[in-house]
């Protein structure tokens, strides 16, 4: 900027600040509320705030004042620079709170409504934009620019700090600016949608720079509020207003997706939790807008599709990029979940971009192919007809590779890579084919017809040997079963033949496995792509197909047992002896062995054993198993120290005391869960009060504890309660050495001691009872008189004479 223009900008800026300060003082002295001022007529506003109205009128060439004099207007570029200057006070805190910012915007909107010219140019070739365009530039410069550009230096709350858990929204200066200017931007957008669209295009071209600021959170929230206001205020549902909403949402989408240049920079990012929160805020606003607006589907589909088309187009043009950025992958999945039929359009768009590439080698090695393969394989929102189109394209590329390749080795590797992608997609979408075969409808019949055509292509146009070496054999076995509908015998014969033809050495097989792993690592939309975005993973998780390739040692992984596949037959033939298997079961079912095995189980598994059979139910009630579980409950597990204090239990009873260990465990577990909640609340209270939890300093606040006596589940909330409770236990303890039962109440203690006295007081005459004994009679009596009476009545005496 030249010195003359700079002096003019400073002069206009001084006039703007003087106008704002004088008008703010008038608002405070006149004691008029902002609502009343916004509802006043133009004449009343000119009378109460003459400086403000005079300044606004001076911004255009045609100026009408009270004296009917004409004043020259500054160029539109100077006006924009003055309003966007870091020292401009029209968006300061005092101006917003006094209402001058809103009143100034109201007068600017009034000026745009009164002006009818589309822009003029005087004899000095000074360009004057139309009032609507100028005011739209002023508002969008303030709304869409970050605080670092608007204020010259960003506040601490608006700086992108990866170490923060989340931004300090209450301290950010961008949210109040959106609240003040958003209603007036909506008015301009509804009345002048074409001008709004033109200004937004200029801003989208200017905002291609890469910067990370917390102002993006205010931008996303404010744009969704502005879009809802535009939709609410547009009663006629104009097409131009819909285009304005699309341009606003595209601007917000570009701001999120342009933060990373490529996948390498995105993978090295340390602030993915902030990106996750930003994406979550964007798609939360999308969900709310979908419920509020009738034209949400059209607007959102056009926005997401256009944004992804540009993002993937940049990937298609950049040959140096190794993969699609993970943020684009997450954005695509969430957009397909919220926008109907978006997945079909994305598949068609990516296929068109792949087919537009010049050479076949560029198609195969381009990241868009791995993006498309992962999208069709891992996202169940992609319908089966679109998946079949992608598979058909891969088969066509397989055929074309045989004619365009110069190097035979390169041709073979290229064809096997395409077969690997075909097997990968079909393997993960096997459940879709199974559900399709169970449907009975005209649509399902049409898709089955397409499936038959793909089966013919798969069996006729791909070499049989590539099926054996391009991918793991057990992958291909599942493909034959679920996609070609072969029987189990045919699938087993294919596996046996592939294992017989596998003559590679161990080193060659490891090299082949490394190639499979490298190809699988390039495919997008796998679960690791979403692990850095936990909130977005929770949103899209119901529509993700988990990959069975995570564990290489699993039977669904790349290899089995980490060995060559032909060695698995020798391992399986050694364990087919039924007598040996039966003997192993007999040894396993011995009571001592089963009790030893179950001693490593938790309480939950012991309870589940009851449902197996009667023998297991009897074993699960064993006192020895529940005794060790009860004595370990509440104790720390492992060497890692827990934040919560331990709550151990100690059995002080004698040998003759009978325990119900299972019931005691259940009762203590219920109380222990309640105790843990109380302890966490107490620890949080201590942390909030600023007290330290070091081992050298004593904690001032008492942490709730539980009684350590066996069978007692009392919880103490203070140290005095704990002390009194232990004193009661020591006082009311049974004196019998073999019992030593402890109580906390005198009544139960006396009752227990009476039971002991009753058992110990046995009559001495019990051993002197007289037994009848006549013909096996077992009746006994305490006295001889009763015995005689019994014998006389029952004739139990010998009548023979001596």
Image (tube, grey):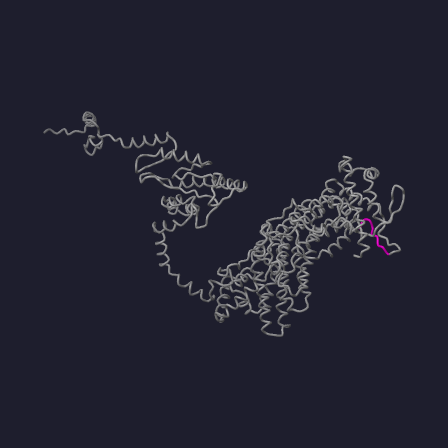
Which sits in the foreground, 788 or 759? 759
Q: Is residue 372 visible?
A: no
Q: In the orientation shown, which residue stands out farthest toward the right?
A: 68
Which sits in the foreground, 412 or 249? 249
Q: In the orientation shown, which residue stands out farthest toward the left?
A: 802
Counting from the top left corner in percent of width and height, residue 657 is at: 33, 38
Q: Is residue 511 visible?
A: yes
Quadrant where the N terminus sits is bottom right
Q: Dividing the picture into quarters, in which one does residue 57 lie?
A: top right
Left or right position of 624 against 166: left
Left or right position of 445 against 789: right
Quadrant where the C terminus sits is top left
Residue 321 falls within the magenta-colored stretch: no
Residue 564 vertical placement versus 720 (above, below): below
Which sits in the foreground, 751 or 357? 751
Counting from the top left corner in percent of width and height, residue 292 is at: 69, 44
State the residue at coordinates (34%, 49%).
591
Residue 473 vertical placement versus 673 (above, below): below
Counting from the top left corner in percent of width and height, residue 360 is at: 65, 69
Left or right position of 494 against 754: right
Which sits in the foreground, 162 or 525? 162
Counting from the top left corner in percent of width and height, residue 526 is at: 57, 57
Count the marks: how many?
A: 0
Residue 129 falls within the magenta-colored stretch: yes
Residue 422 vertical placement versus 666 (above, below): below
State the residue at coordinates (37%, 58%).
581
Span colored in magenta: 125-133
């Amino acid at each position: 900027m030249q010195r003359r223009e700079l002096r003019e900008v400073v002069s206009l800026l001084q006039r703007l600040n003087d106008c704002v300060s004088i008008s703010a003082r008038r608002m405070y002295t006149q004691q008029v509320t902002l609502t009343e001022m916004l509802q006043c007529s133009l004449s009343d506003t000119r009378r109460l705030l003459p400086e403000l109205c005079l300044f606004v009128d001076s911004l255009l060439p045609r100026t009408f004042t009270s004296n009917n004099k004409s004043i020259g207007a500054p160029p539109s570029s100077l006006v924009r620079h003055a309003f966007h200057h870091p020292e401009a006070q029209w968006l300061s805190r005092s101006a917003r709170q006094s209402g001058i910012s809103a009143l100034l915007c109201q007068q600017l909107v009034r000026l745009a409504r009164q002006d009818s010219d589309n822009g003029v140019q005087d004899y000095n070739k000074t360009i004057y934009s139309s009032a609507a365009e100028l005011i739209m530039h002023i508002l969008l410069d303030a709304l869409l620019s970050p605080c670092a550009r608007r204020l010259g230096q960003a506040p601490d709350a608006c700086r992108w700090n990866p170490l923060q858990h989340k931004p300090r929204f209450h301290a950010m200066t961008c949210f109040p600016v959106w609240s003040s200017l958003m209603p007036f931007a909506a008015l301009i957008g509804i009345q002048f949608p074409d001008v709004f669209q033109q200004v937004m295009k200029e801003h989208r071209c200017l905002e291609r720079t890469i910067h990370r600021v917390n102002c993006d959170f205010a931008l996303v929230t404010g744009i969704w509020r502005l879009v809802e206001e535009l939709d609410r205020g547009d009663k006629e549902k104009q097409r131009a207003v819909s285009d304005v909403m699309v341009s606003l949402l595209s601007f917000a989408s570009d701001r999120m997706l342009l933060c990373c240049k490529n996948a390498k920079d995105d993978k090295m990012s340390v602030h993915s939790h902030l990106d996750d929160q930003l994406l979550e805020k964007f798609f939360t606003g999308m969900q709310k807008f979908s419920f509020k607006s009738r034209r949400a589907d059209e607007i959102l589909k056009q926005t997401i599709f256009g944004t992804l088309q540009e993002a993937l187009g940049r990937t298609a043009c950049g040959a140096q990029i190794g993969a699609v950025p993970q943020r684009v992958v997450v954005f695509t999945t969430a957009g397909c979940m919220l926008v109907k039929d978006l997945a079909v359009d994305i598949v068609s768009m990516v296929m068109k971009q792949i087919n537009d590439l010049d050479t076949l080698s560029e198609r195969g090695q381009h990241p868009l192919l791995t993006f498309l393969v992962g999208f069709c394989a891992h996202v169940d929102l992609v319908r089966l007809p679109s998946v079949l189109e992608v598979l058909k394209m891969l088969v066509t590329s397989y055929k074309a590779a045989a004619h365009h390749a110069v190097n035979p080795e390169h041709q073979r590797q290229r064809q096997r890579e395409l077969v690997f992608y075909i097997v990968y997609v079909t393997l993960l979408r096997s459940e879709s084919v199974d559900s399709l075969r169970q449907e009975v409808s005209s649509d399902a019949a049409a898709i089955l017809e397409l499936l038959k055509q793909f089966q013919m292509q798969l069996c006729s146009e791909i070499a049989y040997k590539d099926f054996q070496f391009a991918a793991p054999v057990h992958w291909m076995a599942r493909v034959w079963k679920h996609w070609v509908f072969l029987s189990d015998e045919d699938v087993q014969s294919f596996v046996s033949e592939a294992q017989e033809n596998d003559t590679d050495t161990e080193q060659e097989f490891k090299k082949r496995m490394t190639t499979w792993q490298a190809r699988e690592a390039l495919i997008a939309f796998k679960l690791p792509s979403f692990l850095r975005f936990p909130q977005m993973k929770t949103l899209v998780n119901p529509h993700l197909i988990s990959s069975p390739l995570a564990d290489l040692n699993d039977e669904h992984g790349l290899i089995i047992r980490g060995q060559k596949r032909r060695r698995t037959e020798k391992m399986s033939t050694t364990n087919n002896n039924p007598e040996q298997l039966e003997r192993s079961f007999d040894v396993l079912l011995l009571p001592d062995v089963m009790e030893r095995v179950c001693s490593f189980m938790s309480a939950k598994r012991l309870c589940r054993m009851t449902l197996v059979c009667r023998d297991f139910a009897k074993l699960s009630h064993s006192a020895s198993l529940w005794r060790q579980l009860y004595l370990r409950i509440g104790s720390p597990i492992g060497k890692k120290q827990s934040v919560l204090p331990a709550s151990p239990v100690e059995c002080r009873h004698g040998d003759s005391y009978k325990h119900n260990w299972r019931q005691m465990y259940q009762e203590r577990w219920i109380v222990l869960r309640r105790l843990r909640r109380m302890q966490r609340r107490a620890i949080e209270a201590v942390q909030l009060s600023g007290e330290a939890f070091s081992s050298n300093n004593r904690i001032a606040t008492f942490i709730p504890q539980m009684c350590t006596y066996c069978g007692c589940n009392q919880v103490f909330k203070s140290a005095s309660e704990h002390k009194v409770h232990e004193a009661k236990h020591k006082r009311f303890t049974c004196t019998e050495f073999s019992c030593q039962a402890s109580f906390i109440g005198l009544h139960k203690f006396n009752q227990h001691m009476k039971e002991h006295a009753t058992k110990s007081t046995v009559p001495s005459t019990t051993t002197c009872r007289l037994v009848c004994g006549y013909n096996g009679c077992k009746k006994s009596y305490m006295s001889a008189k009763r015995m005689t009476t019994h014998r006389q009545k029952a004739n139990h005496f010998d009548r023979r004479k001596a």
